Amino acid sequence: MKRTTLIVVLIATLLIGCGRRDVTSDPSYGFGSLAGSKWKLKVPIAIERNGIGDVCTDKYAAEFAAGSADLNKFSGGDDPVVGILPSGTVIRVDRLEDRGGSNGGMDVFFSVLSGKHTGETIRSISPEDIILPNTFITPGKSNTKSWAVDPDKLEKP
């Protein structure tokens, strides 16, 4: 009986500790200062479709924006590119999600406020594409706990 109880407790602990959770308002993350802020893209961002929805990356966007890549044929690896947010697109930072689990990681969600993809919510699975490094999104690479956008990629509208 004790062994069964121990196993159940261990499994429950693992399951509870491994889920995604919205930490936008959690003061220990300090994301509240960035949530709700609006920004204009200074560089194009590609939207890829993967198993968790639409995600953004700056890896391939410049090629598409310059017309040197075919959006309909380019896959960028495993995930197809389904759209481009061009320079000048206005976005709003919405929320921060902790992925949990042993790999950790953070996702920043933003809404598109202008252009072809207006109304869409995009998940940035590599927040360092638009957010400056900090201890939450790049552990070990930065000692700061503050949140700031990358001024080379975003500016106030």
Image (cartoon, rainbow, N blue to C red):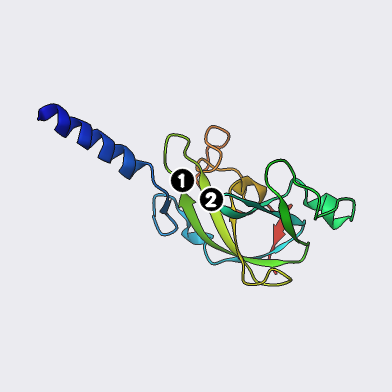
Horizontal and vertical percent position of residue 68: 90, 51
Q: Could you tell whether 91 is left or right of 89 in the image?
A: left
Task: Return the residue nearer the eye: 41 or 65.
Answer: 65
- The spot of residue 66 in percent (x, y) is 88, 55
66 vs 29, nearest the viewer: 66
CA–CA distance in space, label 2 to label 1: 7 Å
Residue furthest left as drawn:
1
Residue at (67% x, 72% y) in the render: 118
User: Residue, x 55% and y 58% (percent of image)?
Assistant: 109
The amino acid on which the numbered mark 2 sits, given as a three-letter code, is: Asp
Location of the N terminus by quadrant is top left
Is 95 located above or below residue 19 in the figure? below
Figure quadrant of the C terminus: bottom right
- The answer to whether mark 2 and mark 1 are in CB contact below 8 A is yes
Q: Position of residue 32 (x, y in %)?
A: 47, 60
Query: Does residue 13 appear in the picture of this structure?
Result: yes
Q: Residue at x 42, y 54 (%)?
A: 23
Residue that numbered label 2 is attached to: 107
Question: What is the three-letter code of the residue carrying label 1?
Answer: Arg
Residue 83 horizontal/vertical position (percent): 74, 59
Residue under label 1 = 99
- From the viewer's perspective, tell me whether residue 61 is left or right of residue 137: right
On the question of residue 146 being in view, the answer is no
